[in-house]
Image: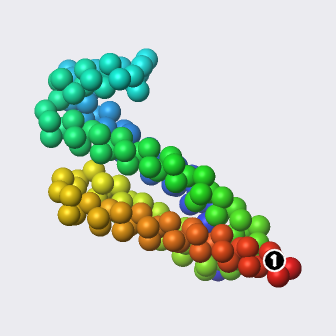
Amino acid sequence: MSNYSLHAIPVFWLLIQLPHAYAVTLIKKSNNGKWDNVNARGTGTVASYQKVASAEVFARFERAKAAHKNGLESAPFFIGAMIAGNLAGLPADTMNFAAGGFLALRILYTFVYINTTRQRYSYFRSFTWWVGSLLWLRIYWKAGNKLSAA
């Protein structure tokens, strides 16, 4: 069986850029096609977006940005797990399951994050995050076990 787990790293990187691109598109539609790329994270810039976008659009913008940031925060852990698992020589099916499962859960997580507007449904988003995290945590554990036995 081929091992595609390292290929999952650039795929993940591209996936976590999508919510940012979506957030920019939301603001540009509300702001006559304008996006301040000079000071995109500035509090004044974000405040100006809040003034031009409807409350619903701005909330969706915030959730899309949060999904993007969460992806960036998760990246080192996922990347490290893929590298550790491969260095330890874990089986391809184990690595592919973890990588593919994580990517699928990240897609679901991002969709749910951006589209959830009720508190009670937000827990499903948290559930998808935890299950995805358990996939890469399992790889660290298995890699650690294999390397410590060597």
Quadrant for residue 49, please give it. top left
- The kind of residue tagged 1 is Ser
The correct choice, above or below, for 59 with respect to 87 in the image is above
Q: Which quarter shows the C terminus?
A: bottom right
In this rendering, position of residue 10 left or right of residue 118: right
Give the SS element for disc 1. helix
Residue reaching furthest to the front: 119
The correct choice, above or below, for 26 with respect to 72 in the image is above
Residue 136, image x, y percentages: 57, 68
Q: How has the structure been colored for display?
A: rainbow
Residue 22 appearing in the image: no
Quadrant for residue 90, please give it. bottom right
Q: Residue at x 41, y 45 (%)?
A: 68
Residue 117 appearing in the image: yes
To which residue does mark 1 refer? Answer: 148
Q: Residue at x 64, y 64 (%)?
A: 81
Residue 135, image x, y percentages: 53, 71
In this rendering, position of residue 37 left or right of residue 94: left
Residue 113, image x, y percentages: 30, 54
In this rendering, position of residue 9 left or right of residue 142: left
Q: Nearer the viewer, residue 99 or 64?
A: 64
Residue 126, image x, y percentages: 36, 63
